[in-house]
Image (cartoon, grey):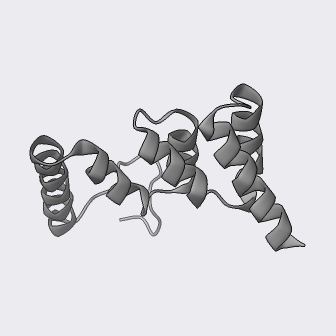
């Protein structure tokens, strides 16, 4: 057999990892169907990666989710905050983005 991993071969997952992921997916679906979806999404947002947080800040359906996402954005997401400010300068989201951007700039000085 070869000494190295073959990049053309699909990665093998441990059966325990597959079971854990299936359980997490099942729990998520159950929560979305039985609880308030907005609360479920807000809870997930706390552990979301930067891309998903930026996406939520730009276009989440629930206002509370957008506000929370804007509040979670950091220095690396200044362009997203500026995009929100340009698209919606007078909306509550634009004002929140401007406030967050000012906070980030002041903190980095």
The spot of residue 97 in percent (x, y) is: 68, 46
Instruction: Say which quadrant the N terminus sits in.
Output: bottom left
- Considering only vertical position in the picture, is 3 above or below 21? below
Name the side, left or right, on which 4 lies relative to 94: left
State the residue lying farthest toward the right: 109
Front-most of residues 51 and 93: 93
For the point 77% across and 40% down, which residue is it?
82
Q: Which residue is found at the position 45% from the left and 57% from the top?
A: 48
Viewer-closest of 37 and 96: 96
Q: x%, y% of residue 10? A: 35, 48
Tell me: residue 46, above or below residue 57. below
x and y percent of residue 23 in the render?
13, 59
In this rendering, position of residue 64 left or right of residue 97 = left
The part of the image, by quadrant, that contains residue 63 is: top left
- Specify the quadrant that holds the C terminus: bottom right
Apparent side of residue 72 relative to residue 78 in the rendered image (left or right): left
Image position, residue 28 (x, y; %): 19, 51
Q: Residue furthest top?
A: 87
Residue placed most toward the observer, 12 or 82: 82
Compared with residue 48, is residue 35 higher up or lower down, i.e. above or below?
Answer: above
- At horizontal 40% and vertical 37% (from top left) the residue drawn is 62
Q: How many dots with numbers? A: 0
Left of 51 or right of it: where is 105? right
Q: Is residue 10 above or below residue 102?
A: above
Picture residue at 71% right of the left edge, 31% below the top: 90
């Amino acid at each position: 057999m070869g000494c190295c991993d073959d990049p053309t071969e699909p990665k093998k997952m441990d059966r325990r990892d597959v079971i854990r992921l299936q359980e997490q997916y099942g729990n998520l679906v159950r929560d979305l169907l039985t609880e308030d979806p907005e609360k479920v999404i807000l809870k997930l947002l706390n552990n979301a990666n930067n891309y998903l947080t930026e996406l939520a800040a730009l276009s989440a359906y629930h206002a509370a989710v957008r506000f929370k996402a804007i509040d979670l954005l950091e220095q690396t997401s200044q362009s997203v905050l500026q995009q929100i400010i340009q698209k919606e300068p007078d909306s509550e989201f634009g004002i929140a983005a401007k406030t967050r951007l000012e906070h980030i700039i002041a903190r980095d000085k």
